[in-house]
Image (cartoon, rainbow, N blue to C red):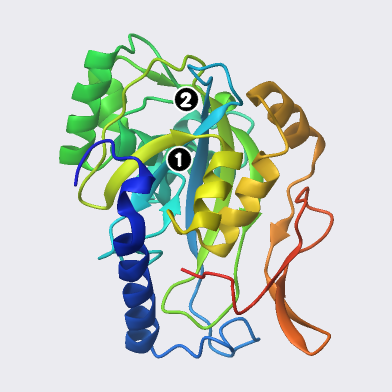
Amino acid sequence: CQGFRHPREKGQLGKLRWREHDAAKHARDGWDCMEDFDDADNLPLAIPAATLVVFRRDPAGGAAQVLLLERSGAMRFAGGATVFPGGRIDRADYDLAERVRGDLDLDDAAARVAAIRETLEESGLAIGVVGNVTAETAVAARRMLIERGALAPVLEAFGWQLALDRLTPFARWLPKHRAPRIFDTRFYIADLGTGAVDVAVDATENTHLFWASAREALRLADLGEIQVIFPTRRNLERLAQFDDFAACLEHARATPVVTITPAVAVRDGARWLTIPEDAGYPVHAEPIDSAMRG
C-alpha cells in the first residue's frame, strides 16, 4: 500500500505480521533477545545517522502533530516499525556540510544535511532549505534526489540554499548491544508550520506515512495499531509533554544533549532497559521483555 493509510487499517493482521517479522529477524541474526543489551565484545563500528522530527499545526486545532512513517517489513533495521524520517549520514553529506557548516561542528552539520536529505527523499518535504520552494518544486527536487542520490546537485539545480539553523538538536542515541548494525543517531526538531500540506511515501523503504500528535501515536502503539521501538517510544513520550512546537523548542534549547546508551538494570528480580534520568525524558525505564528493539 502506498501513500496515506491510517494505522488503524492494519488491525490484527498488522500485529501478526509484526510478531512474525520480529521473531524471524531475531532468529536470522542470531540474537539472544534477553542478552542483546548486555556489554558485548567486538561490537560493530557505529554508523552515523540522523533523524528529523517534523512538526506541523493540527488542521483541526489540536496539539501539534509530527510526521511518522512505517518502514517496510523487508528493511533489516526496524522493519515494520513506525519511526521519524531519517537514515545514515553519507559521505556526500559530509562533503556538503564542509562547505556550508559555518560555525557548526562538522559532524553536527553533516547530520543536519542528512536529516534534510532523508526527509525530502522519504516524504517530499523540503525542510531546512530556502529559495523558491513550492509543492511543485519539492516534487521535482525529490525526484532528482532519488535519481542522483545526493543533495548538493538538487540545491544547485533549484537555486536553493540550506538553512541548517532551522533544525534544532533534540537528542542523540547510541545503543551498545549485539546486533548486525549499530547506529549513532542524532535527533533534530523542525517546524513545518501550516497543517495544509501533502506528503507522499517513498515505497522503496516505507509503506505509509501519517501525521499524528505524539500522544495519539503513543495511544496507537498501546493499542497495537502501530509498532514503535524503544528509542521512538521514549522520544514520543518526551514530545507528548508539549502542545506546540514553540514549547518543545524552548525545552530542547534548555536541555543539553547527552548521548543516550540504554543499559540493563535488575529491579525486584526483573530486567529493565534504562536510560539516563538527566536527558529530558519523562520515562527512564521499561521492562526489557516489553521493549521493542530494531
**Nearest to the observer: residue 240 or residue 133:** 240
Q: Residue at x 32, y 76 (%)?
A: 20
Could you tell me if the residues under marks 2 and 1 are in contact, i.e. CB atoms within 8 Å?
Answer: yes
**Nearest to the observer: residue 95 or residue 10:** 10
- The amino acid type of the residue labelled 2 equals Gly
**Nearest to the observer: residue 258 or residue 293:** 293
Q: Is residue 133 left or right of residue 62?
A: left
Which residue in the rendered view is the most extreme toward the top?
132
Secondary structure found at label 1:
helix
> Which image quadrant is residue 247 in?
top right
Q: Is residue 58 left or right of residue 148?
A: right
Residue 186 in the image: state x and y as whole percent.
57, 50
Judge whether 274 appears above or below 97 on screen. below
Query: Tag 2: Cα neighbours inside 10 Å, few (<14), some, or many (≥20)?
Result: many
Please give the label number shown on residue 115: 1
Residue 21 in the image: state x and y as whole percent.
32, 74
Q: Residue at x 35, y 79 (%)?
A: 25
- The amino acid type of the residue labelled 1 equals Ala
First in sequence: mark 2 vs mark 1: 1
Please give the label number shown on residue 128: 2
- Note whether residue 76 is visible: no
